Image: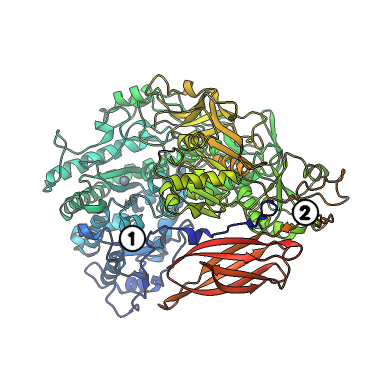
Amino acid sequence: MRTSRAVIGATSLALAATSVLASTATSATADEVTPAPTASVADNRGLSASSSDAARTSQARVVREAAESPVSGTPLTMPSAYPYQPQLQLYRDNPSDASKPAQLLGHPDLAPKLEELMAKSDRISVQVVGQSTQGRDLYLVTLTAPETSAETARQAAWKTKIKDDPTAAAKDTLLQAQYKTPVWISNNIHGNEWEGTDAAMQYIEYLATAPLSEVGSILRNNRLYFSPSLNPDGRTNATRATALGLDPNRDMITNATAETKSYIRSVQAIQPIYTADFHGYTGVLQIEPCGPPHGTNYEYDLSIPHNYALALKVEQDVVAAAIPGNPLTSAGGIAIPYRDDQEGGWDDFPPVFSAQYSAFFGAATSTVELPLGRAGAGGTQTPERAKVNTAVALQTMKSIVGYMNDPTSAKEMLSNQIETFRRAQSEEPKKQLTVSGVSSVPGPTQWRPLWDTLDDQEPLVLPNAYVIPRGAGQRSESDAAALVKQLLFHDIEVDRLTSATTVGAKTYPAGSYVVDLDQPMRGLANSLLDLGDDISDTVPQLYADGAWSYSYLWGATVDKVGVVTDGPIGVSAPVSAPTSNYSVPATAGYATFDVAGVADFTALNALLEQDVPVSMLADGSAVVGSASAATAAEVAKTYDIDLEPATAADLDALDDATTKPLRDLKVAYVGTADDRIALTTLGFDDLTQVTAAGIQADASLLDGVDVLWIGSTFTTASPTAPTPVARAAVQALLDRGGALTGRGSAAFNAAKDYGLMTGTALTSPGSATALVSVDTPDSSVLAPYRQNTAYIYPATWFTDLGAGTTVQQRYSSKPMLAGHWRPSSATNAPANAANNASVVSSETQRSTAGVKARSIVFGTSVFFRTNPKSLFSQAARGIFWAAPAAASRLSAPAGGSTTSPAQPSTPTQTTSPTQTTPAPSTVKAPSSLEVSTKVKRAKSRAAKKTVKVSIALSAASATPGSTVTLTRAGKTLAVVQVAADGTAVVKVKLRKGRYTLVASYAGTATVMGSTDTVKLRVR
Ligand SMILES: [Zn+2]
């Protein structure tokens, strides 16, 4: 429980509005599900023109089963025979569907159409491969000639052989002759790039129903996979992002969205030889391969020749089709970046995009961009443009499949995939495509000069392995476990050392993890774990991220060891999950844990949420009292935390001035989805999004807020700003000891405007995207579990700092480690940031005696696309440092410490059960009161809804049987008795609307009263 601030004589106030109720988000949830029609075994499924094979029809019925709804991110279970035709969940029509203005298919149209085709044809199979953020099914549609289970098993075995035993696969003539080419066409990952979906559905219908004389060869030789819509929420709501507010086509290595989790499981299951992801809009049809700079971990000599030839075939076909309204280039063709782009136009440098992710599976890949941009109202498309784009997309899909159905192309591309996996497991050095390498590459020659001038990188030296140590050499065991989990999700093989092993000068304890690069996903593993390259001098700009290293940005210590030609490291065994970190002390007593990684902060917040008194020591660790041992053990289990018995030194430190009793923080933020997701991930669950205008309209939004986090522009402090109410509310927050925190120049300027800091915020060009090195002074707030790398996109640094502004971290003398940062002026180069502050803080005396407000601002991109997990922990540490302390302090157990604990300096009481010093009788201990509410979902259309109000008083001071009064606008709603555990629950019925409920505890002779208010919205 949060204890009240010790303001004697005043009524204490503690707010606990639940985030769900404070939310003003209006995004639509998935259309309600209507019952699917009853499956009929008497329908004519399987009796289409394509086949009347009775055995296969019966096979189809065998595999037809109720649609399972796999969770996005779980491995896909692939059909054991084809067709696989489950019953699909249907969705109610949505009148405001953003697909409608353009007369395009809405997501609710997909399932009925697929059901209809499944009823007609045994060539089509449909799987549900996850759900969108708002709960819409994600479909994977397969078009192929029917297969018996024996045939499907054989295809599956070949797929495995290609990846895991490529040398044998290369010699397997039956495989080469009969392996069905997996081709994957995905669409609509950007929700407001619609037409790929419609073209795919038209093509699916054609393939399912056309005479076998037209499509028989395609269906026999290939498995054509279609993802009609990878982002149905965005499709429905006319947004590029998913309903989470993140761009899924930048999320392939972070996987914060359900949609990309599903994409990654799909590419693993399909193992495509060719894949295209349909987007829009670039004015003229565009198909990859990309121009430079090229990613360093791909096998371009294998993928580019066919990928380029395929693009040329698409161009030829699209031009010949002369689709009315389809614009062509001045040269009369389409755009192929590889051929047409100059420097830094459309590159394939980072693996954050769908196509550049899939390429690691040995596929030739493309991001296809449709021509005609949105011209409808409210960011929608017009029917005329949609028609052109759909026709262009359909032609492109047909040309792709035509190319892939050519036996020579298919066989060579299969060989290239096999060779990709063979190289990965060969322990051979990577052949860098520099000048000499390029000259030996077969295929088109147009790109060689471009490649050479723009991509003349140092040869990529592959290490033997990446080692993730455990024990003393590991910065964060929790981040290490999270990293291992993430690597396994990406199909990267991770081993565990079975005994202590010395590599070079370092000895790794048993249990340390090894990612040996002798593995099928070598390219992906190295791309994800390597530092990357500084390519600032190579190209003028990048299309997107320039650095993304898990080793430097995910918080765990990772060592790069040896060279790829070395033999295996020690003796190890493969793992399927990280080793659990969970442990609890053998006997229930004071306990401690490292607060180093993301899960540690999440656990810390979970403890605070459950009213556990926690103190943070100067070394960054947390200490929990013996009275909370059971709760602490439960939390440690949930978050996989290593909870250790507190040492005598830990107990001694409890009363140190540098030890901070933590409170359950209420955080308000100004910012984006990045801020919301990162803070939520860290466990700051009492979180409200605010804006200057919102606070101006309702200043109570900041009532009880402990920390204001600023992630985007917030200019309320100026006397001329049109938000005087907001300004006063922020001043009030600071005056009661609340904190102003955040990132970038927006946060720094706000801190300045409120008189908390002095100095100047400077920034790199917005295009700068880099992994940088930073220095953390020993005295820094960020010194515990120090991390000396950070991410910027862009960088902000702080200069001309006044005496009251403290540097907590600096950019190092040479900040650039990897990525791209090219200055646009004489003042925004890495050299300008060098040695300047990257994180600053302040502590300011407020007008009330003894009250100080703290501020901390990060110039690094701590929450960028939720990827740099290492920076999440830095931000969280900063927030806990800046936030007000809990009023009561965890004391050492009597006699359990080598020195006796000092008396509490305030009259507030510790909740430690061993605390025996009574408060002086003249001073009354305030009781804290915390109210939370939940609106019960109405089953009927009743005018009033039930609201459950939970009230919690600090157990130390509340008297069981005493009462709490719940009022609204001065009117009493209920009088509730306090139970023995210090809580009270009441249910009230309220109409739709917004409410402020006030709970008041009158207090007793020895305990002061208190009140708490909670805002809620009933809908
Ligand atoms: Zn797009």
What percent of the width, then of the height, locates residue 755? 53, 34
| Position of residue 255 in the picture relative to residue 976 (left or right) | left
Q: Which of marks 1 and 2 is in front?
A: 2
Residue at the far top: name it.
Answer: 826
Circles 1 and 2 in contact, beta carbons < 8 Å: no
Q: Where 807 falls versus 153 (above or below)?
A: above
Query: Which element type, helix, strand or loop, lies under badge 1?
Result: strand
Image quadrant holding the N terminus, namely bottom right
What percent of the width, then of the height, locates residue 568? 61, 37
Name the amino acid, label 2: Pro
Image coloring type: rainbow
Q: Quadrant of residue 120?
A: bottom left
Residue picked out by circle 1: 141
Q: Residue 613 versus residue 702: which sits nearer the camera?
A: 702
Identify the disc placed on residue 481: none
Residue picked out by circle 2: 585
Name the amino acid, label 1: Val
Image quadrant holding the C terminus, namely bottom left
| Position of residue 262 in the picture relative to residue 704 (left or right) | left
- Residue 380 visible somewhere in the drawing: no
- Write the residue at 54% across / 26% down: 801
Disc 1 C-beta below 8 A from ligand 1:
no
- Write the residue at 53% across / 43% down: 731
User: Callout 2: few (<14), some (14-19), or many (20+) C-alpha neighbours within 10 Å?
Assistant: some
Q: Where 886 falls versus 523 (above or below)?
A: below
Mark closest to the chain's N terminus, 1 or 2: 1
Q: Residue 432 versus residue 219: which sits nearer the camera?
A: 432
